[in-house]
Amino acid sequence: MQTAHDYLQQHAALILDDIKRLVQAQSPSLNKAATDRCGQVLQAIVRERLGVEAQVCPQETLGDHLLFCVGEGPQITSILGHFDTVWEIDEIPMVEKDGKLYGPGVLDMKAGLIQAIWAVRAIAQTGGLAQHSIRIICPSDEELGSPSSRQWIEQHAAGSSRVLVAEPAVAQTNEAKIARKGTGRFEVRITGKAAHAGNNPEEGISAIQEMAHQILYLHGLNAPEVGTTVNVGVAKGGGKLNVVADEAVLGVDLRVTNMAEAERAVAAIRACKPHLAGAAVEVTGDIGRPPMEQTPQNLALFNQARQAVKRLGFHLEGKAVGGGSDGNFTSAMGIATLDGLGATGVGIHARHEHIIVKDIPLRTAIIAEILLGENGREG
């Protein structure tokens, strides 16, 4: 009997064509019109490959979210894959050369989304779908932190026995992601008092000087020994050289490996206090994505995946990474979650973003084998 891997190898050219179709449908997160056009292309691909229509969740200002349901079996699996990207229209081109496909969002994560669709098609075409009910959950705002889709994702993932996330692989063909850091964003707004920098500077309170104190304090919260990073990525203040600045603002990124450390770090960031007499400091923000921890259920799913992938002739490796994904949400719900099952390549959010074309059938087969389970067609 034909295996899913055999089927996918035979259809490698079509899988690549579908990836190109989706990449060419450019979808900047904040461009609703473009992202919805991309959603239409995605719906067409799923209609053609899986024969199902999307359940559309309309959005006012961001792209509409899409849900595809395939199969009616007892084994409920959710697959997560966003179709928005960080790239503006025509910011980078799509180019295929030297065995690599370059393009906006090709690695993060349009190739992985297409691979997931074809993995489902492969098990359907080779007789393995009967025991399965698969929900392909496609939000349009992941690159923004999923502000409009988190509750929608959680709603449709609820009841799943497992969640597979088609985000990019760590680096190698045989790798998946078993842990991700939680992420938080904060704004520190500083208020001082304006004065003439030459005539009466002593009457002013420099928000920029206060900002310098706050930057040193915030960077002092880094705790690399437990995986916590605090980074001031944005610093703005003042406006004219001859004026003591009365306003400044900082943008702060937080990454943590577990919720206990998240609570400590968030409390420390919120505890920012002014150093200069008369200055004021206001902190807003919070954890946006909880960490995807190595929970017992996540590790159990990873071990099951290892057994399933043995049929492809190699040993699946697990890696922990610093970036977050929508899988963080489902993991925090207590649902077994395995991430990083998408394409291999390099350059997430970089101009040289690309996938390795030869790895497409095998990486797609990995998803198919995990869907089938360690006992193959029995689920």
Image (cartoon, grey):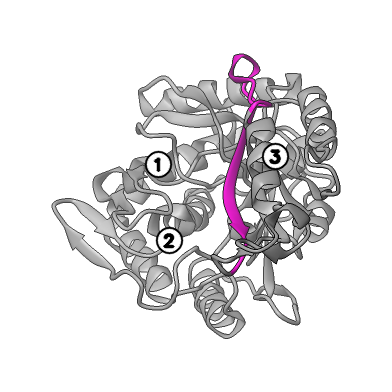
The local crowd at label 3, few if under 14, some if 14 to 19, many if 20 or more residues have their Cα within 10 Å, is many
Which residue position holds label 3? 214
Residue type (three-letter) at the residue carrying disc 1: Arg
The residue lying toward the viewer, choosing from 88 and 137, is 88
Q: Secondary structure at mark 3?
A: helix
Residue type (three-letter) at the residue carrying disc 3: Gln
Q: Quadrant of residue 70?
A: bottom right
First in sequence, mark 2 or 3: give its number: 2
First in sequence, mark 2 or 1: give its number: 2
Which residue position holds label 2? 105
Number of marks present in the image shown: 3
Q: Residue 191 colored magenta?
A: no
On residue 363, which mark appears? 1
Residue at (54% x, 53% y) in the render: 120
* Residue 3 in view: no
What segment carries the magenta color? 220-239
Q: Position of residue 240 (x, y in %)?
A: 57, 69
First in sequence, mark 3 or 1: give its number: 3
The residue lying toward the viewer, choosing from 274 and 219, is 274
The local crowd at label 1, few if under 14, some if 14 to 19, many if 20 or more residues have their Cα within 10 Å, is many
Residue at (80% x, 28% y) in the render: 259
* Image quadrant where one finds the N terminus: top left
Asked if 260 appears above or below 136 in the picture, the reply is: above
Residue at (26% x, 58% y) in the render: 101
* Image quadrant where one finds the C terminus: top right
